[in-house]
């Protein structure tokens, strides 16, 4: 059974700092991994999707990596800003299946 | 306009009442999903539908039912609401032809059962 874990559950950093959010999963037979941003009381916004055959994806100040062999993905945020404050969730879709398993998220607070 | 919309956005209801949450999408996706989100637990799948005639239970379907009225519409019903169904409910869509099943979410419905 696939389990997805995000550590830490919460993180507070000063503005301008580069930071890494972690996502680990127990079953390496994945189809893709998706990172989302969720603002309080709002829906999920897709940030990056990495397919199983890819190692990383980049969008602006965000870079997501995928290492299936170790069951890990990281989301790197460069030069963090107060507007980056939100909860970040990772979600794993397994190979040959329809279900997507979500982590509980990391709540990020960037201090001005 | 948003690709995935949900109504209502907020709802307070009493125990035992029947509630319907509605979802509409303009992305043309075949697959639609209903999730609930509870603090600290991530999102859990309630029901999913691959097309109008194909509806399946997810991991926490007890106490819920769904209807896929059209490709673009997927409704979730709570037959007799109970307090532990208080949660944030999300509708989502995906399609194999769109960025390998990338999921698109609605804004959510915050449901409170008293």
Image: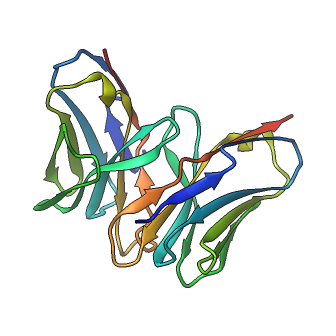
Q: Residue at x 71, y 40 (%)?
A: A85
x, y percent for residue B100: 43, 74
- Tally the marks: 0
- Its colouring scheme is rainbow
Residue lying furthest bottom = A53
Please tell me whether residue B103 is drawn above or below residue A15 in the rendered image. below
Quadrant containing the N terminus of chain B is: top left
Residue B26: percent from the left, percent from the top? 32, 54
Q: Nearer the viewer, residue B104 or A6?
A: A6
The part of the image, by quadrant, that contains residue B49 is bottom left
Pick the front one: B98 or A101: A101
Vertical relation: A33 (above or below) A89: below
Direction left: furthest residue: B53
The quadrant holding residue A75 is bottom right
Image quarter (top left, top right, bottom left or bottom right) of the C terminus of chain B: top left
Which residue is painted at 55% across and 66% down in the image? Answer: A25
Is residue B100 shown left or right of residue A21?
left
Left/right of residue B102 with respect to residue B23 in the rendered view: right
Residue under the point 22% across and 40% down: B76
Q: Give the percent coordinates (x, y) of residue B2.
A: 42, 46
Residue A94 x/y as whole percent: 42, 72
Q: Which of the 4 quarters of the picture holds residue A90?
A: bottom right
Query: Is residue A52 toward the left or the right of residue A107 in the image?
Result: left
């Amino acid at each position: 059974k696939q389990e997805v874990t995000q550590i830490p559950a919460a993180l507070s950093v000063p503005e301008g700092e580069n930071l890494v959010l972690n996502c680990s999963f127990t079953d390496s037979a994945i189809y893709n991994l998706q990172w989302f941003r969720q603002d309080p009381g709002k829906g999920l916004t897709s940030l990056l999707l990495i397919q199983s055959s890819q190692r990383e994806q980049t969008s602006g100040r965000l870079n997501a990596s995928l290492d299936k062999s170790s069951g890990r993905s990281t989301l790197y945020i460069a030069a963090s800003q107060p507007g980056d404050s939100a909860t970040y969730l990772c979600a794993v879709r397994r190979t040959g299946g329809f279900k997507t398993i979500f982590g509980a998220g990391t709540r990020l607070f960037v201090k001005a | 306009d948003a690709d995935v919309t949900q109504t209502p956005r907020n709802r307070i209801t009493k125990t035992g009442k029947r509630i319907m949450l509605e979802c509409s999408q303009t992305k043309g996706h075949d697959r639609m999903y209903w999730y609930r989100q509870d603090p600290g637990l991530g999102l859990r799948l309630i029901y999913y539908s691959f097309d109008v005639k194909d509806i399946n239970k997810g991991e926490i379907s007890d106490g819920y039912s769904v209807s896929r009225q059209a490709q673009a519409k997927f409704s979730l019903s709570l037959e007799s609401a109970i307090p532990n169904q208080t949660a944030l409910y999300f509708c989502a869509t995906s399609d194999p032809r769109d960025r390998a099943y990338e999921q698109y979410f609605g804004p959510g419905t915050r449901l409170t059962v008293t």
